[in-house]
Image (cartoon, grey):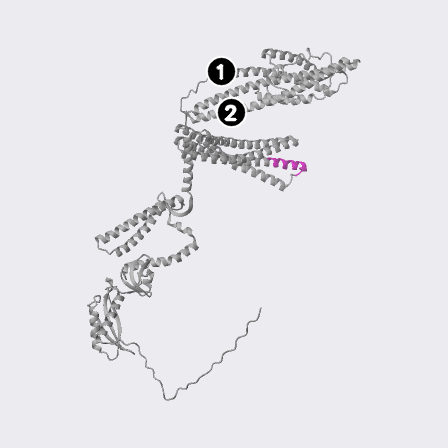
Amino acid sequence: MAGRQAATSIRWPDGRAGLPAGGKPALHVVAGVTMAAWLLLVGAGAQAQAIPGLTARSTPEKQAKPTSDQPAPDAAANLDGLRTRLVSERKLLAVLDGPNGLAAGAPPGTDERALKQRHIRITFLVSTLVQHMADLEKLGETQKRRAAAEKELQAWTGLAEKPPYSILLADRLRADRLAASTELEGLRGREELLRQTADDYRERLKQARQQLRQTTEKAERARSEADQVQLAWQRENAGLWVRLMETALGHQETLRQLIEADIAIAQLGLDLAQRKLEQVLADVRFNEADIAQVRAALTIERDALLAETDRMAHEYPRLHEAARAAREASDALRAGGGRKGETQAEYLARIGRLEQDLELKQARLDLAGVHSEHLRDVLALIRTRGVLWEARYEGHSKQDGRSRQLARETAEKMQAYLSAQKRQLEQIRKSAGNRVSEIESRMENGGLPGRNSHLRELQKIYGEHLGAIQRTLTVLEVNLNLAQQMLVEFGGDSGSQRSWAERRADWEAVAAGYTAAFWNFELIAVEDTIEVDGKQVVGTRSVTIGKVLVALLLLVAGYVLALLAARFLARMLVRYFGWQPAHAGILRSWVLAVELMLLVAIVMFWVKIPLTVFAFLGGAVAIGLGFGMQTMMKNLISGLMVLGERPFRIGDMVEVGGIRGNVTNIGLRASTITDVNGIETIIPNSTFIEQNLTNWTYTSGRVRFNVKVGVAYGSPVRTVTQLLEEIAGRHGKVLKNPPPEVLFEDFGNDALVFSLYYWLDVRSGTPARQVASDLRAMIEAGFSAQGIAIPYPQRDVHLDATNPVPVRVVQVEEAPPSPPPPLP
C-alpha cells in the first residue's frame, strides 16, 4: 500500500506534495528541475561518518545506473533493479522513521542538522525511485503510442471526404496543425531544459564520487577508533549522496527518452495534419452551406451572450441596492456611535465587519458592471467575426479581383483594430492580476481567520474578473487568427506563391478600389428633402467627385445636343417660314439659353445634387456674386424686353448714348452697333431701355438729309432754287417721293444761304455721305455753268484818318551779360 501511494505522488524534502507519477512529461520536467534545486540544497556541506548496519547491500559504484550517454538497458530489467533498490532504501528509511531512529547508526554527538539531512536524502531517494519507476511504465506506453502513430501515418492514403472540401474542414485542420506545432515547440523547449538539468547532475555526480574517494582514502589512513567511526559516517553519507545523484541522473535519462518519444509523436501528428491540410487545400470551396453553418453558429453564440447580458442587466439593480444599503448601514453606524454598554473594541469590530461587507458588495457591483461591459465587447467581437466571415465568403465565392481586394482590406483593418484591442485588454488583465496579487499579499499579512475569509471572497470576485477578461481575449484571438488567415488566403502574406493572373487581378482590384475611392470621395454634404416611405424628410446628400464628373459629362453632351437643336430650329424658320437669318439667329440664342437652364436643372436632379449646393459659397461670396450678377441679370432682362418690344432690328440705324450706327447683332446681354467708320460698339441691352433711343429706320428706311450752300449777293434767287431742284432730281439715289425741297434759309454775312433737302432709303444700303458729296460736286459744276458765284468770307476794315498816326523810333537797350557761375 505504501509503495502504491509512493507511486502516485512525490513528497519533496520540505514536505510539499509532488506531481503525480502518471502525469505528462511536461510535469515530470518541472518535477526534475525542482528536484535538482533541492539536491543542490541538501548536498551542501555534507559530512559523513561510517554507521555500521545502515550501509546499502552494494557499494554506490556498483549500483550506478546508466547516464544519458550510456545505452539504456531493457525496461523490464531496469524496473526490476529499481524495485530491488526501492525495497533496500525503504528499509533504511523505516529505521530512520522509527523511535529515536533519526540518530540510528550515527556517532554520539552528531549534529542534528546532519541527521536531518540524511533523512531528507533518503526520503528524496525513495521518492525519486518511485517516480522513476512510474516514468518507465509511462515510457513503455508512450513508445506504443509512437509506434501506433507511425503506422497511422504510413497507412494514411487520403481523407474519407470527397473533394471539393469545405473551407471549414480546412480551418479545423489548420487548428490541428497549429496545436501540433505548438505542442512540438513546447516539448523541444522542455527537452533543452532536461539536457541542462542532466548536465548539472553529471557535474554533481562527479563531485560526489570525488568526495567519496577522498573520504575512503582518509578512512584507510585513520588510526584511532574515534577517527575511523567518524570517517565511516562521512563515507556512508557520501555514498548516499552518490546513490541519490545516480538515481536522479537515471531518472533524467528516462525523462529524456519520454520527451523524445513525445516529440516523435507530436512530429508525426504534425506531419499527418500537414498532409491532410495539403490534400484539402488542393481543392477547397466556400459554398453557401458553409456560410450558412457559420451564420447559424454565430447566431447561437450571439443569442447566448444576449441572454447572459439580459440576466446581468436584471442582476445589476439588485447588487446596486445591496451596496447602497451596506453603505447606508456603515454611515449610520459611524454617525450614531456605539451601543449602550458596548466597548470601543466591539464598536470598532462592528464597523470593521460592515466595512468588509460594504467592500464585498461594492466589489460584486463593480464586477457586474465590468462583466456587462465585457459581454458587450464579446458581442462586438462576434459581430466583427461575422463581418470577417462575410468578407471571406465574398472573396472566395465571387473569385474576382475586386472582391479579393475588399476581403484583404477588411482583414487588414480588422487585424490592426484587433491587435490594438488585444494590447489594451492585456494591460487590463495585468492590472486585474496585480489586484489579485495585492489581495494575496493582504491575506499573507492578515493573520486573522475572519479577515482572511473576507479576502478570499474578494480574491474570488477579482478572479472572476480575470476570467471575464480572459474570455474576451479568447474570442479576440479567434477573430485575430481569422483575419490573419484571410490575409494569407487573399495575398496578404504569401504573395510570392500566387500566380501572375492572380497578381494581375489583384492589381486591377487595387486600381479599381482606388478609382472607386476617388469616385466616391465626398466634396461636400448639403441638405435636401428626401422622400422616405412616402414622407418628405429633410436629410443630407453627398456631393462626390463621381457625381460632379457625371454632371459635367451630361452637361457637355446636353450642350452639344441643345446647340444642334437650336441650329436646326433656326434653319427651319429661315427655310420654311421665311424668317430673316438675323432674326432666326436671335431666336436660336434664346432657345439655347432656355435649353441650357433646363439642362442644368435636369442634370442636377438626375445625379442627385440639390440646387442648395450653391449655398456653400457663403454669405460674403454670395453677396459679392449678387452685386456682380445684378448688372448681368439687368442686361438679360433688358434683352428679353428688347426681344419682346423690338425697338430695333438687325440692320436698323440707331443712335443711343451719342453713338450712331447700324445694328449688326442683338445678344442676350448686349447688342452690337457698327458706325460709318466700321467701328463695332458693344452696348449693354439695359442702355437701350434706360436711355433715349433713336431708331432712324424704325418704321421706314426713308431718311431726309440736307446740303447747305451760299451764293453771292445779287445772284438770282429763283434761278438758284430751280438749279438746286434739278440737280437733286438728277441724282439716282435721291428718292423722287417725297420730292427734294429747296429753301432760302437766311441772309448770311457773306452770302445768301440755301438748303437742299432730299430723302434717301438707308435700308437699301445707300451711303448718305457719298450722296451728299455727289450733290455738292454737282452744285459746284451747275453754279459755274450759270455764272453763279459761291463767295468766300469777306471782312471790310475801316480806318479813322481824321488824326495823323504818330510814328516813333524806339531804341531797345541790350541787357548786360550775366556773370559766370561760381567755380565748385
Quadrant in the rendering for residue 387: top left
Image location (x, y in percent) of residue 516: 41, 40
Is residue 349 covered in magenta? yes
**Disc assigned to residue 179:** 2
* Predominant secondary structure, magenta span: helix
Q: Position of residue 98 (x, y in %)?
A: 70, 15
Range of magenta residues: 340-357
Is 408 positioned to the left or the right of 457 in the image?
left
Amino acid type assigned to the residue bearing label 1 in the image: Lys
* Residue 101 appearing in the image: no
Mark 2, residues whose alpha carbon is within 10 Å: few (<14), some, or many (≥20)?
some
- Which residue is drawn at the image coordinates 63% and 13% (left, top)? 82
Q: Are marks 1 and 2 in contact (CB under 8 Å)?
A: no
Asked which quadrant contains residue 657, the reply is bottom left
Label at residue 151: 1
Judge by depth and name the residue closer to the eye, 207 or 121.
207
